[in-house]
Amino acid sequence: MTAEILLELRDLAKRFGPIAAVDGLSFSVRRGEVLGFLGPNGAGKSTTMKMITGFLTPSEGTAIVAGFDVTKAPLEVRRRVGYLPEGAPLYGEMTPKSLLEFVARVRGVPAARARELIDAAAERLQLASVFHRPIETLSKGFKRRVGLAQAILLDPEVLILDEPTDGLDPNQKHEVRNLLSDMAGDKVIVISTHILEEVEAVCSRAIVIGNGRVLADAPPQQLQARSRYHGAVTFVIAAPAAESAASLIGHLTEVAQVETREAADGRVRLTAFANGSGDTLGAVRTALQDASLGVEEIFQERGRLDDVFRQLTTGNTEPGGAST
């Protein structure tokens, strides 16, 4: 059975004078999907999110959230959406506790139920140590966690998050990603982020936009397969042996090109790009072993989202570096 569509954009557009910030976006997202919403600065990501949540009125088109049209029933849409804007704007004089109480009260949640929801959100985001401190005194990471807490407070069907892990340390990012994965089963989660590893870790689907239009829409693994690094073999070798290794590997029939990059501590990183025939990893490993060229690390690339992102948004397929 196909999952229910909870979010649908229909020719959504926003113009500011002669500038088209969003230019006719159309796509739908089903319950259970975690969508990575990607694009360069100025592509229209934040503007799109503000229109979905009712904070900006579309110039054309509309967004349908859980069956409600944002242009006709914005209050019904907001009841079903949790939203974390970019920068996590919060009332600095409030504490996390008073902010969450305020959000629950504005949403009309009964006091007893509000206490349960606030306690659950605070526990999920580990806010106990700062729960009674003014938000303006908190670190950037804690402010982001407070912003996340208010977004998930009422367990919304559609969760819109703009840079949700901005300012968090690696452990906190890991915890938030686990939280989002745990929550994803019965809702739609849309994540706008510049951290592409986050898309790989959390998202079941990714949309890349540029100049307000959709450039790609696919699972992250399919996008990775479009990378020039897909199937390439990368290895690290001592600098004195790098030139010999590059020449040796460059003559293999399974290799189209070798790229050399400096690594740290007198080592060099080489990448052998596959030409689409044969076992590239096996050929490279065997050639290095036969030549007694020991490597410290060797692995086959799955493809790189940053490479595909660059191709889609700039048309540049060359990552730079010396080639052999």
Image (spheres, rainbow, N blue to C red):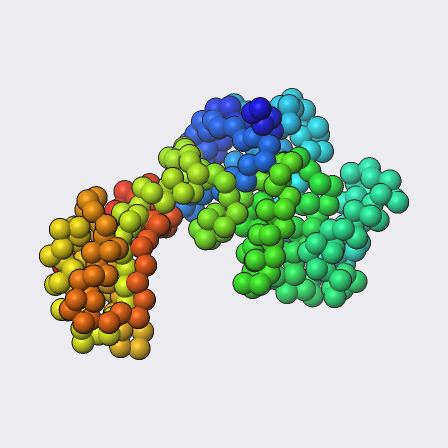
Does the rendering let one see residue 119? yes
Q: Residue at x 66, y 51 (%)?
A: 147
Q: Residue furthest right?
A: 112
Residue 168 horizontal/vertical position (percent): 57, 61
Tell me which corner region of the image, top left, top right, bottom left or bottom right, holds residue 3: top right
Q: Is 9 situated above or below 130?
A: above
Quarter of the rendering occupied by the N terminus: top right
> Which percent across, then down, holds residue 14?
49, 31
Question: In this view of the protein, which residue sits in the foreground, 199 or 167?
Answer: 199
Horizontal side of 207 relative to 144 (left or right) equals left
Q: Residue at x 82, y 37 (%)?
A: 108
Residue 91, image x and y in percent? 71, 53
Tell whether 38 sits left or right of 259: right
Q: Residue at x 69, y 51 (%)?
A: 149
The one of 172 and 53 positioned closer to us in this rendering: 172
- 117, above or below 288, in the image: above
Quarter of the image with the C terminus is bottom left
Residue lying at 64% horizontally and 27% vertically, measured from the top left: 66
26 is higher (above) or lower (below) than 286: above
